[in-house]
């Protein structure tokens, strides 16, 4: 991108429009990852030459059509082409080519062998692109004015979107209405106001959500805007068979109707339900009746409780076990107790994410030794501290004889005990000094002559 270019992303048509200010040229580039009915040609590497002249052309939002190349130009994916319209010419982007076009047509109920196709005239010129952009710029103001006119005429309808044709001679007004609306007078007013041909097209709430687009509660783009082209009826029976809560706020989508995704797994749940027995009453055991409280359909596990109105104590049974118990009850037999039945051994989902602590790599804080505090200059105190550290590093039982040797010394020689109390470093160094038979006063001179006396008195 240079400084004299302006880029605009048109999500409604899935393209990037670039305006070059110096030359006044306007370019349009197809963006395949657009959220409005995006296509992926998964047969591009298996081109067998069929449907080589058929192309899918995209217009605004979810409107698409199939056209045949009637020109001598080589049309490829992403080209901006001028196509045939009912009146005049339209302009769109080629989104599919090759064999995938035939499959796409059959999915929409169109037979590619017998269908009549409109033509692709040529690739769009610079004049065609400029006229197309001028028509697009009129859409927003036209929609606002059309809504005001419809409200002034008292019509019970909502105009959801306006789409101009590529040559600017015609516009399609998409509207929503609960019932039939007589808009013959409205078309005359629109034609006089906007000086174009008018086409009114009624759409439903789901189609309107697809035109507008957005994100669903799952965080992904709306299915109606992304890939759904034909909408099927959805009922609350789809939610019931999946054991979903019948909460309208949770089951409704952005269109206000039931979510389209409720139909996605209905077939899977219906197949799983065929393996689960229908329990209309309680199961009979020797110690009471067990009532069905809930069912996990996909895991084929049923939960029973002795209390009909409480889910406090639930007992899980496999569907196969419930079949056996029902057969026993029909034969007049009763199992001993539900409490003795083991719970099914069902592996749970295990993940390593979050099992480790985020502080597992933090280095532990080491306690700093306060070696400078209370350090004695004397030889006896230093050796006494070493003597005490040695038995502490070994078994704790080895430190007890040193304490027993010190007791007679305290009772027999009061002078030595008083000398130990006068020691500035306390009792530990004196105790270590007595173990070595040297002085315990920490002065280096010690009570070497008194230590043998303390040993004799202890003997």
Image: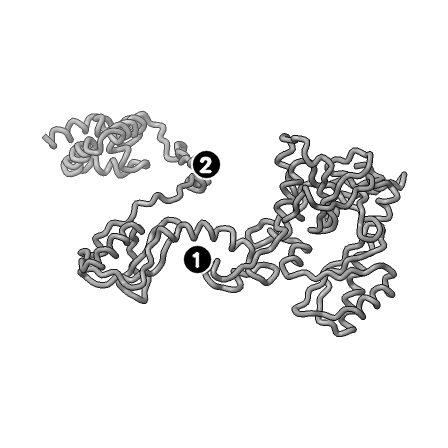
Where does label 2 land, which residue? Answer: 362
Instruction: Please give the label number shown on residue 10.
Output: none
Whole-percent x and y of residue 205?
A: 64, 61
Q: Is residue 17 above or below residue 433?
A: below
Mark 2 Cα shell of 10 Å, populated few (<14), some (14-19), many (≥20): few
Do we see residue 446 in this rendering?
Answer: no
* Quarter occupied by residue 199: bottom right
Q: Nearer the viewer, residue 104 or 169?
A: 104
Under circle 2, the secondary element is: loop
Q: Quadrant of the N terminus?
A: top right
Q: Is residue 454 left or right of residue 344?
A: left
* Spot occupied by residue 121 in the image (x, y as percentages of width and height): 82, 41
Say whether residue 452 is left or right of residue 432. Answer: left
Residue at (27, 35) in percent of width and height: 428
Which is in the foreground here, disc 1 or disc 2?
1
- In the drawing, what numbered circle is on residue 241? 1
In the structure shown, which secondary structural element does the residue marked by tag 1 occupy? helix
The structure's colour scheme is one colour
- How many tags in the picture? 2
Measured as percent of width and height from the top left, residue 330 is found at 22, 59
Please tell me which residue is depicted at 68% across the width and 67% down the height of the picture.
177
Foreground of the two, 346 or 378: 346
Q: Which of marks 2 and 1 precedes in the sequence?
A: 1
Quadrant in the rendering for residue 112: top right
Q: Position of residue 210 (x, y in %)?
A: 65, 54
Residue 394 appears anywhere in the view:
yes
Q: Residues within 10 Å of mark 1 (few under 14, many from 20)?
A: some
Residue found at the far front of this picture: 114
């Amino acid at each position: 991108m240079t400084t004299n270019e302006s880029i605009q992303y048109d999500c409604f048509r899935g393209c990037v429009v670039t305006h070059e200010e110096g030359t006044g040229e306007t370019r349009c580039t197809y963006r395949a990852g657009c959220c409005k009915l995006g296509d992926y040609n998964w047969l591009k590497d298996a081109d067998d030459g069929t449907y080589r002249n058929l192309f899918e052309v995209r217009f605004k939002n979810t409107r698409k059509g199939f056209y045949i190349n009637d020109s001598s130009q080589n049309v490829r994916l992403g080209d901006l082409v001028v196509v045939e319209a009912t009146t005049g010419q339209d302009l769109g982007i080629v989104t599919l080519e090759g064999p995938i076009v035939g499959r796409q047509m059959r999915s929409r109920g169109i037979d590619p062998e017998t269908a009549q196709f409109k033509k692709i005239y040529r690739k769009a010129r610079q004049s065609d692109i400029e006229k197309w952009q001028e028509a697009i710029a009129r859409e927003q103001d036209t929609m606002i004015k059309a809504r005001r006119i419809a409200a002034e005429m008292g019509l019970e309808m909502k105009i959801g979107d306006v789409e101009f044709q590529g040559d600017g001679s015609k516009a399609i007004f998409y509207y929503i209405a609960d019932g039939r609306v007589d808009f013959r007078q409205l078309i005359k007013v629109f034609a006089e106001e906007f000086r174009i041909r008018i086409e009114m097209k009624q759409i439903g709430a789901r189609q309107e959500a697809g035109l507008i687009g957005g994100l669903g509660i799952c965080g992904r783009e709306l299915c109606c805007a992304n890939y759904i082209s034909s909408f099927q009826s959805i009922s609350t029976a789809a939610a019931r068979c999946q054991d979903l809560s019948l909460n309208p706020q949770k089951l409704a989508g952005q269109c206000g109707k039931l979510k389209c995704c409720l139909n996605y797994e209905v077939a899977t749940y219906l197949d799983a339900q065929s393996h689960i027995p229908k329990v209309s009453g309680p199961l009979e055991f020797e110690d009471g009746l067990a009532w069905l409280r809930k069912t996990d359909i996909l895991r084929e596990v049923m939960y029973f409780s002795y209390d009909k109105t409480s889910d406090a104590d639930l007992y899980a049974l496999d569907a196969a076990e419930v079949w056996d118990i029902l057969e026993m009850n029909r034969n007049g037999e009763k199992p001993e107790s539900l409490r003795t039945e083991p719970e099914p051994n069902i592996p749970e989902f295990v993940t390593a994410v979050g099992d480790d602590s985020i502080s597992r790599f933090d280095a532990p804080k080491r306690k700093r030794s306060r070696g400078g505090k209370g350090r004695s200059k004397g030889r006896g105190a230093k050796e006494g501290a070493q003597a005490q550290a040695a038995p502490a590093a070994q078994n704790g039982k080895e430190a007890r004889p040193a304490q027993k040797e010190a007791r007679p010394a305290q009772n027999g020689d009061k002078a030595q005990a008083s000398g130990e109390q006068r020691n500035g470093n306390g009792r530990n160094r004196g105790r270590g000094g007595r173990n070595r038979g040297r002085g315990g006063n920490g002065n280096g001179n010690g009570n070497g002559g008194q230590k043998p006396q303390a040993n004799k008195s202890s003997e």
